[in-house]
Image (cartoon, rainbow, N blue to C red):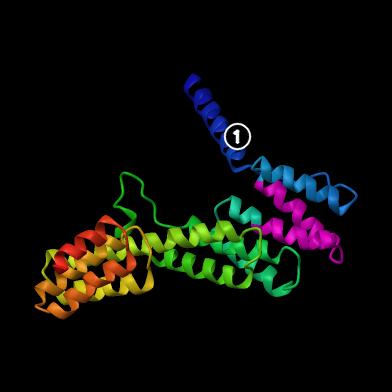
């Protein structure tokens, strides 16, 4: 009997704990009279991670007050809700839908920036127990770079432009690191033509990243291995052009013998 009671108590505690963690209670909340009040209540619920209640408030505003500006705000907040619960593809779809439906809305740049940010949130992790991020699939990083660059083209004066530029620069750095990783994979196998192709691509697509110096000297070494002195010399001259006044340029000057 005691074991049965203990078991029932454990089950009840577990289920109540799960409900608390999910932030969802059954039934409709007590809706307010105005759209603005319901938006505030939904935002408070979102802040407290009560996602189901938050969703109900925002959907109520969208359905009950479709011709008010609050309904447009509710659409954005529903996208923010998906973002907050890390449903990033769903959030992206909602932001994109908002942009298509309301292209002249004052917050369309917010929707575009947040849509691009969903890719950033899905970048491969550098968690210590996993392989380094440069060894993983780079699709989301490429998508992050593409969407951030597109955002900067469309909304150069947006308040979100400085942050978008930081994300674009970070994406270029990470993609350059990936190309350098692949080039060194080929280096270990002495596939010098493949090394040169990857490094040439890195330098064209991602100039000015922190790995540029390494890529240039690795490219020079690859052309030496390929017995191509003309391209090897041109690579050293690229160092002089790209990194003037640096120790790397001094090293290249010495290697050129001039």
Task: Tell me if residue 59 is in the magenta stretch.
Answer: yes
Q: Write the residue at 71% across / 48% down.
A: 54
Q: Residue at x 50, y 19 (%)?
A: 2
Give the residue at x 55% y 72%: 150
Q: Tell me which secondary structure the magenta stretch mostly adopts.
A: helix
Above or below, comparing residue 35 to residue 95 in the picture:
above
Q: In this rendering, is residue 13 above or below 129?
A: above
Q: Residue at position x 21%, y 74% from top?
A: 196
Where residue 143 appears, as percent x and y from the top left, is 47, 68
Give 152 or 246, whichever is nearer the viewer: 246
Residue 186 location (% of width, % of height): 17, 68
Residue 55, percent from left and from top = 70, 53
Q: Tell me if residue 137 can be seen.
A: no
Q: Confirm whether the magenta stretch covers residue 165.
A: no
83 displayed left or right of 176? right
Q: What is the span of residues highlighted in magenta in the rendered image?
A: 51-79
Q: Residue beneath label 1, please?
A: 16
Q: Nearer the viewer, residue 95 or 257?
A: 257
The outermost residue toward the front is 258
Instruction: Determine the image quadrant of residue 159.
Output: bottom right
Question: Could you tell whether 136 is left or right of 84 in the image?
Answer: left
Q: Quadrant of the C terminus?
A: bottom left
Q: Taking 229 as reference, is 131 left or right?
A: right
Residue 231 x %, y %: 19, 78
Q: Is residue 35 above or below residue 242?
A: above
> Looking at the image, can residue 217 be seen?
yes
Q: Residues within 10 Å of mark 1 (few under 14, many from 20)?
A: few
């Amino acid at each position: 009997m005691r074991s049965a009671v203990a078991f029932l108590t454990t089950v009840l505690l577990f289920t109540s704990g799960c409900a608390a963690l999910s932030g969802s209670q059954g039934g409709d909340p007590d809706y307010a009279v105005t759209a603005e009040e319901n938006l505030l209540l939904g935002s408070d619920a979102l802040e407290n991670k009560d996602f189901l209640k938050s969703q109900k408030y925002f959907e109520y505003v969208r359905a009950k007050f479709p011709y008010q500006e609050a309904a447009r705000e509710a659409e954005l907040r529903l996208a923010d809700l998906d973002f907050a619960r890390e449903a990033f593809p769903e959030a992206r779809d909602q932001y994109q839908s908002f942009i298509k439906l309301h292209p002249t809305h004052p917050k369309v740049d917010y929707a575009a920036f947040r849509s691009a940010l969903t890719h950033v949130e899905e970048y491969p992790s550098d968690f210590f127990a996993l392989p380094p991020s440069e060894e993983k699939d780079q699709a989301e990083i490429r998508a992050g770079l593409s969407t951030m660059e597109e955002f900067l083209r469309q909304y150069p004066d947006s308040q979100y432009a400085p942050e978008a530029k930081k994300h674009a620069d970070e994406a270029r750095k990470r993609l350059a690191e990936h190309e350098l990783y692949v080039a060194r994979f080929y280096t270990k196998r002495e596939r010098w033509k493949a090394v040169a192709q990857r490094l040439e691509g890195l330098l064209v697509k991602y100039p000015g990243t922190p790995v540029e110096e390494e890529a240039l000297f690795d490219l020079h070494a690859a052309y030496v291995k390929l017995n191509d002195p003309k391209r090897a010399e041109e690579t050293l001259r690229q160092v002089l052009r790209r990194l003037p006044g640096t120790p790397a340029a001094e090293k290249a000057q010495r290697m050129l013998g001039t």
